Image (tube, rainbow, N blue to C red):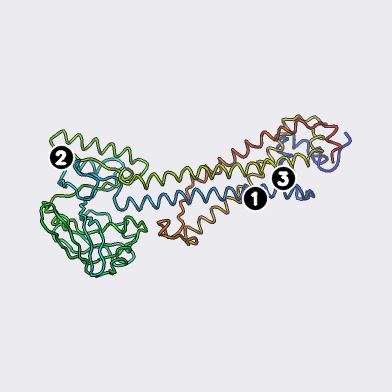
Amino acid sequence: MAIRHGFFGYIYAKQEVVSKLNFALFIARRIFSDRDNKKKFSRSIISFALFGIAFGLMLMILSVAIVTGFKNEIRNKVIGFGSHIQLVNFDSNSSFETVPVSKHQPWMERLTSMEGVRHVEVFATKPGIIKTDEEMMGMVLKGVGPDFDWRFFQENLVAGSVFSVSDSVATDKVLISKKVASLMKLSVGSPVYCYFLNDQATGQRMRKFSVSGIYQSSLEEFDRLFVLADIQQVRKLNNWQPDMVSGFEIAIRNFDQLDEITKKVKGLTIHYAEQDSLLLRPVSITSKYPQIFDWLNLLDMNVWIILTLIILVAGFNMVSGLLILILERTSMIGTLKAVGSNNQSIRRVFLYLSFFLIGRGMLWGNIAGIGICLLQSYFGIFRLDPASYYLEYVPINLKLADLLLLNAGTLLITFLMLIVPSWYISRISPDKAIRFD
């Protein structure tokens, strides 16, 4: 054989080693690690393709992390005002004037021990008006008991503190939003005059409260509406018995189990209703505020569209890069065919080479995407307008499972797109390829 120098000379010199390895993988590694490649044109094309893969994967990581983070933040804010499930009297309508029920229910022990249920608390609501000398606005006084979970409002507290609730003495402290405080010119310690109407009363009833703390959730619809107070204040306004409440709020551990647990709660209440107990109906947070959760679900479609477009663009960039590699290695392909290599083994060479190149691009894409996510998560570099986006900064929800799926999907789809152009190798004839320049 006349060809015994250069790249192929090295192959024949290492014939014993090559025979023990995958021949196509060996050549692909040699081409991939060749630092003396003088073909500047192919180098620039491949670099552009790698940049497309890296940039595309970075955008996909950011898109998934931001959209899932945005959904989680908005969802948690809405849940903070009404928990995952509310149990109310079957006769109650969608207004905040509710038909009371007793807080002592025969199924309470089974509900609190139900799998997936994290916390159960009582609540009561009463619509009214906040009035000052200059301003007035509608609101809903939400009464909470000693069992209320304050974590959401503590996390969103901007001034003052939350108030404590006991079963013995009623407190006149209330928690208002920063939006209400700004509109009504209130601050911590300010008196709050609220007016209410009762079906049993011919005139209005006034209550004076004191601002204990100010919170800000950035959900203007909720911030303008809810004022938190002692549940005993709501009972007095509604002329209820000491054990009467509007209903129960149920917090669950996993949002994905919301529908399943709602059905279980419904079955539990129906079972005891058959034993001459009052019938209550569970209302999930998704059915209580369908417009918000339908809007959040639309974001999933946007993410899929973005991911599809990015993967297609990155894949076509890599296809063009592979075709350039094949064209510039035409003489090598002809020589390999001349020494007995078949089309399938040569195709594997370029597929292995593409796999290495895709892996390099994905490595840099992961580094860039994860790096930006970590910077945003810890330092909040990119901020938002709360009036438009309900958040003060771009949220990040980076999960290992999402990263693995994005990387696996990108690698698989891009690699599959390269199989078709690799068939071009079978059309290259050895005699013309060896003379190709």
Q: Amino acid at mark 2?
A: Leu
Q: Earlier in the sequence, mark 3 or mark 1?
A: 3
Q: Secondary structure at mark 2?
A: loop
Q: Residue at x 16, y 41 (%)?
A: 106
Pick the quarter of the image with the C terminus: top right
Nearer to me, 28 or 415: 415
Marks 3/2: CA–CA distance:
74 Å
Q: Secondary structure at mark 1?
A: helix
Residues packed near mark 2 inside 10 Å, few (<14), some (14 to 19) or many (20 plus): some
Image side of residue 298 versus residue 18, left or right: left
The residue labelled by disc 3 is 32
Callouts 1 and 2 close, C-beta under 8 Å: no
Residues packed near mark 3 inside 10 Å, few (<14), some (14 to 19) or many (20 plus): some
The location of residue 374, given as percent across then percent down, is 50, 56
The residue labelled by disc 2 is 278
Q: Earlier in the sequence, mark 3 or mark 2?
A: 3
Q: Residue at x 27, y 43 (%)?
A: 283
The location of residue 383, given as percent across then percent down, is 47, 61
Q: Earlier in the sequence, mark 1 or mark 2?
A: 1
3 or 2: mark nearer the eye: 2
Q: Amino acid at mark 3?
A: Phe
Marks 1/2: CA–CA distance:
65 Å
Residues packed near mark 1 inside 10 Å, few (<14), some (14 to 19) or many (20 plus): many
The residue labelled by disc 1 is 51
Q: Amino acid at mark 1?
A: Phe
Identity of the residue furthest to the right in this view: 2
Which label was assigned to residue 5? none
